[in-house]
């Protein structure tokens, strides 16, 4: 526990991740690191950069495995282009990080004056412009990658694979938009999500009985 420490109580970081991913119990030290950006003073005790490096590669690997298994994959499809538009850091931050509520729990330091950030409206064009100015989506995108890296490290590849298909890829299905996963692959992405328990299912490893049934 860090109650009374120089950086304050961080139990809410662990609670947020545990509540976000049913079936997983994050050690407090891991949760703190995953939700601490290098810009925060507490980064002196560890930040999410290393796990982000791992997580980015795990994300790219799982996306490649998914694409190569799709019946709709065509020889003309450009893997590099698909990956860049699907796993772009800003897209991850806006569409996955926001859905996870990372901005409310992430420890980071905005690049604008504190009073401007504090007094900004809760929504609207001005809020959206400010969010882009301070780089919140990029910070959130980095955190998404770090959480993937942390899950892979702490809970294993099978759990990280379920996380990818049930909590990340579904948020990147943006029909008709030039960002996110190509529309061609949406049907199969949804099917895999449902087979893996859906967007609200437990991420814990299935029991032997469940595996046999599956």
Image (cartoon, rainbow, N blue to C red):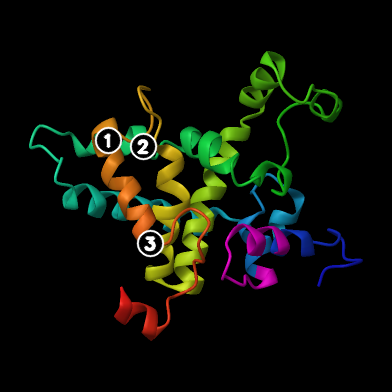
User: Which residue is pictured at 36% across the width and 37% down the height?
Assistant: 86
Q: Quadrant of residue 152?
A: bottom left
Secondary structure at badge 2 equals helix
Distance CA(mark 1)–CA(mark 2): 6 Å
Q: Is residue 45 visible?
A: no
| Circle 3 Cα neighbour tier, 10 Å, few/some/many (<14 / 14–19 / ≥20) | some
Tell how many labels. 3
- The reply to whether the C-beta atoms of the residues labelled 3 and 2 are less than 8 Å apart is no
Secondary structure at badge 1 equals helix
Q: Is residue 24 above or below residue 38?
A: below
Q: Is residue 104 above or below residue 202?
A: above
Q: Earlier in the sequence, mark 1 or mark 3?
A: 1
User: Which residue is pictured at 46% across the width and 41% down the height?
Assistant: 171
| Residue that label 1 marks | 82
Q: Which of marks 3 and 2 is in front?
A: 3
Q: Nearer the viewer, mark 1 or mark 3?
A: 3
Q: Is residue 118 left or right of residue 34?
A: right
Measuring from the top left, give residue 170's x and y in whole percent. Answer: 42, 44
Which residue appears farthest toward the top when viewing the image? Answer: 125
Measuring from the top left, give residue 14's x and y in whole percent. Answer: 70, 64
Magenta stretch: give its range. 15-29
Q: Quadrant of residue 186?
A: top left
Distance CA(mark 3)–CA(mark 2): 20 Å
Which residue appears farthest toward the left when viewing the image? Answer: 75
| Residue that label 3 marks | 196
Q: Is residue 180 left or right of residue 188?
A: right
């Amino acid at each position: 526990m860090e109650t009374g420490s120089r950086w304050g109580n961080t139990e809410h970081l662990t609670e947020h991740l545990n509540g976000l991913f049913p079936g997983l119990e994050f050690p407090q030290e891991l949760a703190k690191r995953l939700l601490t950006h290098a810009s925060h003073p507490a980064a002196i005790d560890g930040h999410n950069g290393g796990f982000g490096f791992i997580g980015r590669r795990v994300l790219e690997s799982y996306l490649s495995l998914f694409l190569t298994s799709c019946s709709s994959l065509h020889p003309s499809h450009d893997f590099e282009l698909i990956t860049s538009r699907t796993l772009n850091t800003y897209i991850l931050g806006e569409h996955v990080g926001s859905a996870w509520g990372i901005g409310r729990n992430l420890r980071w330091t905005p690049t604008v004056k504190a009073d401007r950030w504090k007094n900004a409206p809760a929504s609207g064009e001005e809020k959206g412009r400010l969010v882009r100015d301070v780089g919140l989506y990029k910070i959130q995108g980095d955190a998404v990658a770090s959480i993937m890296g942390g899950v892979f490290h702490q809970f294993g590849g099978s759990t990280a694979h379920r996380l990818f298909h049930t909590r990340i890829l579904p948020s990147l299905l943006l029909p008709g938009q030039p960002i996110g996963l190509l529309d061609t692959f949406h049907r199969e992405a949804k099917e895999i999500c449902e087979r893996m328990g859906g967007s609200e299912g437990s991420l814990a490893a299935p029991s032997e009985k469940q595996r046999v049934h599956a």
